[in-house]
Amino acid sequence: MTTQTATTESTQGLSAAAFLFDAGADGQDSIKQLAAALRESGVLGTATEGLSKLSKAGLEAVGDQIAAITQGLLDMGLDTMILEGWRKFGDLHAAAQRTKAAGGSSEVLDLASHSISTAHEPKVELQVDGVPLATVNFVLARTFELKAAVATVRDGRLVSLHSGVCDVEGSLVAGGKELASRSGHFQLPLLVPLGSGVPLLTDDGLTPVTVTKSVDASLEEGAVVAATVVGTVDGPTSDVTENATSTPTPTS
């Protein structure tokens, strides 16, 4: 299991996988670390116990494939999770409605301290010649504690963050066993790139993910082992808790 604490100044586009495993942008480090965590936890042994005729190298290939698919599921930016939560944040939503109705207007909001919690529960299914053999259930949970955030909303879009810090806690569990956990401290304007602005009045949601991959490992009778994601990562549960009242300030 990986347990770490991170303090950083700039990590735009940081994915959940890179955050949890302190990995590089290409994802290869996180795949290796995840595969090792799956083996050490015993989760892979349970998932592959029905593959008794598979060689040791074949079992390792299956494990690596499960890790690669799971890493793909974790390729979601922390900034995306925060923005998805903010679409449900009452004061930002109200400011977006007001500025959208009064074209060309903007508001600066001194946001209250608040938290955003998200959870995903994808599962990876192992199949032999299309027949389900075993399922590995994952739970990815994150909590964002945001403080001293000052935001500008213009024409219904979040266009800038002037200040704020974000404390993040994340964990990945498989088969009831924790594979990784990490906490981090970030400067909010550096963590959340806004580009030309993020719409607050539409819920774009996350892109559903469904992946099927054949593993390069065969049984004695030539059966093909496949690892398939049977869950998707769209529509995460997301709760926003406000600890105080935000103060909007109209601007020209």
Image: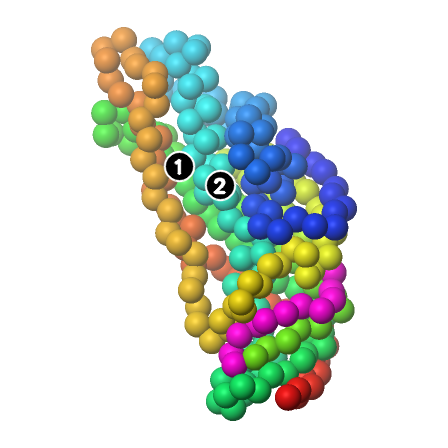
Q: Main secondary structure of the magenta part?
A: strand
- Left or right, 190 with respect to 206, comes to right
Above or below — where is 220 with respect to 91? above
- The residue carrying mark 1 is 124
Mark 1: which amino acid?
Val
Q: Are marks 2 and 1 in contact (CB under 8 Å)?
A: yes
Look at the image and tell me whether residue 144 can be seen.
yes
Q: Which mark is residue 137?
A: none
Residue under the point 46% across and 39% down: 72
Residue density around tag 1, few if under 14, some if 14–19, many if 20 or more, within 10 Å: many
Numbered range of the magenta stretch: 155-165
Q: Earlier in the sequence, mark 2 or mark 1?
A: 1
What percent of the width, then of the height, locates residue 20? 62, 40
What percent of the width, then of the height, locates residue 50? 36, 20
- The residue carrying mark 2 is 138
Residue under the point 66% across and 87% down: 251
- Left or right, 79 with respect to 114, comes to left
